[in-house]
Image (tube, rainbow, N blue to C red):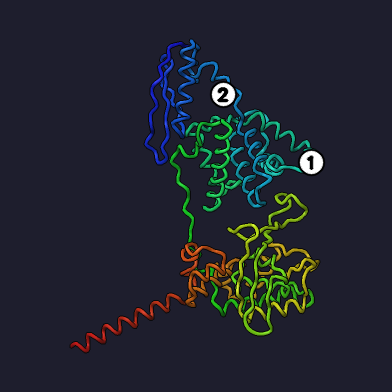
Amino acid sequence: MKSHDVRIWGIRKRPTKKPSYEVRWKVGDAKPFPETFRTKALADNFRAKLMRAAQNGEEFDTETGLPESMATAVTVSLTWYAFARKYLDMKWLHAAPNSRDSINETLTLVTTELLDDRPGRPDDETLRRALRGWAFVVQPEDAEPQPTEIANPLRWVEKASQPLAGLKEPAAIRRVLDSLKLTLEGAPAAAETVRRKRSVLYNALGYAVDLGELPENPVTTVKWKLPKVTKQVDRRVVVNPRQARELLAAVSYVGGYKRARGRRLVGLFACMYFGGLRPAEAVGLRRQDCTLPEKGWGSLILERTRPTVGKRWTGTDSVHDHRGLKNRAADETRVVPIPPRLVRMLRAHIEEFGTATDGRLFANERGGVVASTTYWRVWDEARRLALAPDHVASPLAGRPYDLRHAALSTWLNAGVDPTEVAERAGNSVEVLLSRYAKCLDGREDIANRRIAELLDEDDQEDDDTD
């Protein structure tokens, strides 16, 4: 129904954590219509449009609350799917491969949540394959056309996708946020994964505000708690020096002497433990980055990392990204002093296996970049060789990355200044102290002994007084 009976109230400031401004108006006998904006200027602009339409004698719709001039703009609003494709095109070129993967995963999940129940819906697996493998990947110009089994589901998605403007409703955005707590397969997602996907969604809807499709970012309009992320490393994963030596020795036995599958990677794991390197930093280490004297301490100059991300996200024929250090500028380096034991191990590795054509210390049997799946398999076998059955079943050194945790904890417990440890590790002091300070086995025993000694001294003083 249409009506000329329109009442428009003044702008009301909402007392939320992030202040917002609400425009309210009424058409005929319908309930008042609210519209919320992140700034007073946006609210003023919207209210002015309503006032202008009423003064011009336009009829207002009793269902949408909007005059014809403003309702037309809503009608041609983008669907979520069309907007998501537009956002992907904007972000893809300058996004790191891992970020592309995260954007793809989030857009796929939200898209499946914002679909109408139309006839001919493809099954969930087909939808995920079409969205994750094709719709939300920027294809090269010479890419093959979509196969029919992909093109047909995506045409259905185009028709079934709900309007982007629908996310202005608190119930709709809350439903989308709740969907982030699950993986694409429907299993509960890790807390850090939920936070990452929420960040992507927030950034995407911020772009919708920039385009004028939304008056404000709807993520900020609802109270929704992010799951808490555990900051401290689980102390059960941290090996002590004896366990670390036994694990490194076991790595050398994996694959036998002839294939040398494990021996090729002993130095890789040693860099994580004795140098505190991240796995991707160790994989990308080159001979020209190493100072390896015959005696004494050496050093590593870290500049590049080679994380495994997949060809789909790198946009090249390589499954490995080639990027700078984490949380640092593109060309910034980090110098890591390394003890004589690691110097000797790296010299022995170079003498036996040489280097790859680009100078990398660690390569697979064909000279390529060591894949994460390769060193994970070797590590799993080494754990079974080195650890007792109860330790194999425990979280102890469950991942190669846990060697880095052990390294940083050991340095801290040895009394090395946290600022120096943070510099070597490539962390901030705040992150270092919050995550690694309580991880080394045996630290509790030292504290207990000191407390016991103090209590004994107090008892002795009491005896002397008596």
Report the residue at 45% width, 46% height from top.
Answer: 225
The residue labelled by disc 1 is: 141
In the structure shown, which secondary structural element does the residue marked by tag 1 occupy?
loop
Q: Is residue 227 visible?
A: yes
The reply to whether callout 2 and callout 1 are in contact (CB within 8 Å) is: no
Side of 425 where 16 appears, left or right: left
Report the residue at 66% width, 85% height from top.
Answer: 295
Q: Mark 1: which amino acid?
A: Glu
**Residue 185: x, y in percent?**
61, 47
**Residue 292: x, y in percent?**
68, 78
Q: Mark 2: which amino acid?
A: Val
Quadrant the C terminus occupies: bottom left
Q: Earlier in the sequence, mark 2 or mark 1?
A: 2
In-front residue for pair 421/352: 421
The residue labelled by disc 2 is: 74
In-front residue for pair 267/157: 267
